[in-house]
Image: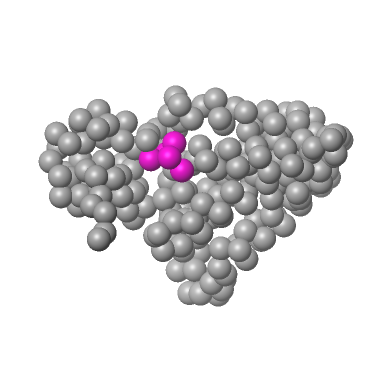
Amino acid sequence: MMERKTTKALILEATERLVAEHGFESVSLRDITNNAKVNVAAVNYHFGSKEKLFEVIQCRYIDPVNEERLRMLEVLTEEGRVATVREILEAFMRPLLTVVKGSEMSEKLFFKLMGRCVMDPQGGLPEDMVPGMKRVAESFTEALLAAAPSLTTELVLWRLHFTFGVMAQTLLHGELLYSLTDGACGDPDAEDQFQEMIDFCEAGFLAEKGAQK
C-alpha cells in the first residue's frame, strides 16, 4: 500500500513544481494551495509564510549541494595535496548535477528549480544558508589560490563568482538558447553541458589578467 504524503510534503512538492516552471515571484499562495489541494492555514502552520516556504526550498536543495562540494574538495586536498583548477571546479559544479539526476522531476524542469534556488529574486540568501555558502567560498578560494598561485584572492573570488553565474544561467535559461537559435546550439544532456561549463570556467580561471592589453 502506497504511503500517504503528509500535508507538509504536498505543499513542498507543489511549490517546487510551480517555482521551477514560473519563478518565485510569479507563484502566489493561492497557486500553491490550489495545486497542493490544501488551505492557506496549512501553509502558515507549517512554514509561517510564503517567503519562509521559499527559503525552506532553497535550503533543502542548496545545503546538501554545499556539503557535497566541501566533501569532494576535502578528498581532493587530503594529506596536503594541491588539486588542479579543473578538479576544484568539478568539485564545485558536480554536486548540482548529482542533485538534478536524483530528482523525480524531469531533468530540464529540475535544472530550472536549481537555477532559481541559487538566484534568489530578492538578491540575498536565506539566513540559514549563509554559513554554508561562506564555508564554500573560503574553502574553494584557498584551494584555488594553491592551484593557481599567480592569482590574487580578489581575482579568485571574482572568478568564482563568475563561475557561479555561469552555472545559474545555464540551469535556468538553457532552453532559451535552443529556442533563440532554432536548435543550432544542439541539445546536449546534463553531463555534456557540465563538461562544457568546466572547459569554459577553467579557461577563465587560468586566463592571465590583462592579457589583451
The reply, left or right, for residue 140 in relation to residue 57 is: right
Q: Position of residue 198 (x, y in %)?
A: 69, 54
Q: Position of residue 145 (x, y in %)?
A: 80, 33
Q: Position of residue 10 (x, y in %)?
A: 25, 48
Q: Position of residue 32 (x, y in %)?
A: 22, 46
Quadrant position of the C terminus in the picture: top right
Residue at 60% in and 42% down = 68
Please identify the dominant SS of the magenta region. helix
Quadrant for residue 131, please give it: top right
On screen, residue 134 above or below 82:
above
Quadrant for residue 81, please give it: top right
Residue at 44% in and 56% down = 103
| Residue 143 visible in rendering | yes
Say how many tags the image has.
Answer: 0
Quadrant position of the N terminus in the picture: bottom left
- 182 and 95: which is toward the camera: 95
Residue 60 counted in the magenta span: yes
Residue at 71% in and 40% down = 73
Residue 108 counted in the magenta span: no
In magenta, the rendered stretch is 57-61
- 141 and 135: which is toward the camera: 135
On screen, residue 9 above or below 172:
above
The reply, left or right, for residue 182 in relation to residue 28 is: right
Colour scheme of the picture: one colour
